[in-house]
Image (spheres, helix red, strand yellow):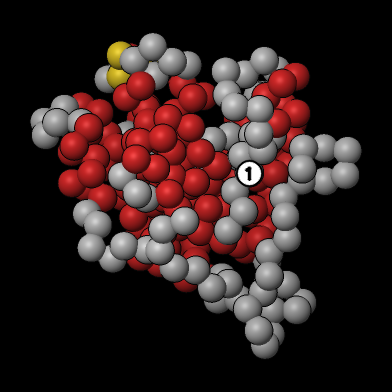
Amino acid sequence: MNALNHSIDPEAIITRFYPIGSYTRDLLLRHGELVGRKALDVLGQADWLNADREFVVQSAVLHDIGIGRTRSPQLGCTGALPYVCHGVEGRAILDRLGLERHGLVCERHVGVGIGARQTVQRKLPLPARDMFPLSVEERLICYADKFFSKTDNGRHEKTIDEITAGLARYDADYADRFLALHRLFTCRPVNAAGPPYLIQPMGRPGHES
């Protein structure tokens, strides 16, 4: 697993795959800026959590880098894969660049994490493995991402109710997982004093874990 490379330029990495002047490049950079800003705002209020802010900003820009391999005309993407594949494709791209830690953010932010059981049951075109956000940084990007739609270019920041209603249309567990993230980032835990608060694994007994 790579340590954080402080010298990487996320915008330059995006430009390697999406040329200057392209609609998709501009969209990715704008969306990444919004997600990064939201993530830092959230983290600024959650002083009971420690996170690598530089990594958060880098990952905010890079988390959707795989969309170009999907068929998403509204995003300027003419690839062959369903949109749900953009996370694993993004991980593959960044893994090849030696950015494995950033690649995990790509893979684990889709939905609110996708489990192996869900992949098999719904016959999703994904690897049958658990892909839940685990680290604070992974969960933070997953959370902040849900406030913005790429299709409206960030003109509207969604409310919590809008986010949960949208997620529930795909899977009821998605809404529950998002609300768990919301509590993590907005509700100070009783054991937050002293050492950094340790987050717990996602999932519940009888659900994806």
Residue 147 can be seen, yes or no: no
- Residue 198 higher or lower than 201, as above or below: below
Q: Left of 97 or right of it: where is 163?
A: right
**What's under tag 1, amino acid-wise?**
Phe
Q: Residue at x 67, y 74 (%)?
A: 197
How many marks do you count on the picture? 1
Q: Is residue 90 above or below residue 76?
A: below
| Residue in the image at 34% along x and 15% along y | 79
**Element at label 1:** loop
In percent of width and height, residue 162 lies at: 58, 36
Q: Quadrant of residue 160?
A: top right
| Residue 81 falls left or right of residue 113 | left
Toward the left, the furthest residue is 21
The picture places residue 156, in percent across and down from the top left corner, at: 40, 39
* 129, 134: nearer the viewer: 129
Q: Position of residue 10 (x, y in %)?
A: 26, 50
Can you name the residue that lies furthest to the right here? 206
The residue sitting at 56% across, 61% down in the picture is: 136
Residue 5, percent across and down? 31, 62
For label 1, the crowd category at 10 Å Cα-Cα, with few meaning under 14, some 14 to 19 and many 20 or more, is: many
Q: Quadrant of residue 67?
A: top left
Q: Is residue 102 left or right of residue 160?
A: left
- Residue 123 against residue 136 in the figure, above or below: above
Furthest toward the bottom, the residue is: 194
Front-most of residues 158 and 52? 52
Q: According to the image, label 1 marks what residue?
A: 132
In terms of depth relative to the viewer, which is nearer, 180 or 8? Answer: 8
Q: Residue at x 34, y 40 (%)?
A: 96
Q: Would residue 76 be visible to someone looking at this image?
A: yes
